[in-house]
Image (cartoon, rainbow, N blue to C red):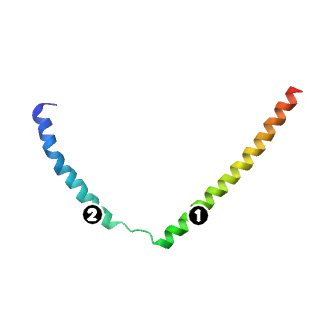
Amino acid sequence: MTGNALTAKLRQWPASIKNYVQELQTEMRRVTWPTRKQVQATTAVVIAAVFAFAAYFAVVDLIFARLITRIFDFFTK
């Protein structure tokens, strides 16, 4: 990149940032934000799903741990 091209890019940088921020503000005005009730409902679903998956994986882990222990006990006796 030549010196002139680099200088031109550096001069365009503040204008590019300003344009980006303006477009961002315009897009944020178009966003349809969820209501508090919707956020609470989806948060409850996520928390319930996390606990359900944690319980499932705890049971699977327990089963595999016991199975592997029995296999090792079988071959070490």
What residue is drawn where x is 36% and y is 66%?
31
Quarter of the image holding residue 25? Answer: bottom left
In the rendered structure, the answer to whether residue 64 lies left or right of residue 26 reads: right
**Total marks placed:** 2
> Residue 33, percent across and down?
40, 68
Question: Label 1 vs label 2: CA separation?
Answer: 32 Å
> Helix, strand, or loop for circle 2?
helix
What residue is drawn where x is 80% and y is 41%?
66
* Callout 1–callout 2 Cβ contact below 8 Å: no
In the rendered structure, the answer to whether residue 66 lies left or right of residue 7 reads: right
> Helix, strand, or loop for circle 1?
helix
Indicate the amino acid at tag 2: Thr
Q: Which residue is mark 1?
A: 45
Compared to 50, does 74 lie above or below? Answer: above
What residue is drawn where x is 17% and y is 49%?
14
Compared to 48, does 8 lie above or below? Answer: above
> Residue 22, percent across and down?
23, 59
Outermost residue toward the right in this view: 77
> Residue 11, percent across and down?
13, 44
Outermost residue toward the top in this view: 76
Other-residue count near label 2 (Cα within 10 Å), few / some / many at <14 / 14–19 / ≥20: few
Q: Which mark is residue 73?
A: none
In the rendered structure, the answer to whether residue 7 lies left or right of residue 64 reads: left
What residue is drawn where x is 15% and y is 36%?
6
Quarter placement of the N terminus: top left
Outermost residue toward the left in this view: 4
Q: Which mark is residue 26?
A: 2
- Counting residues from the start of the chain, the first of labels 1 and 2 encountered is 2
> Residue 61, percent across and down?
72, 44
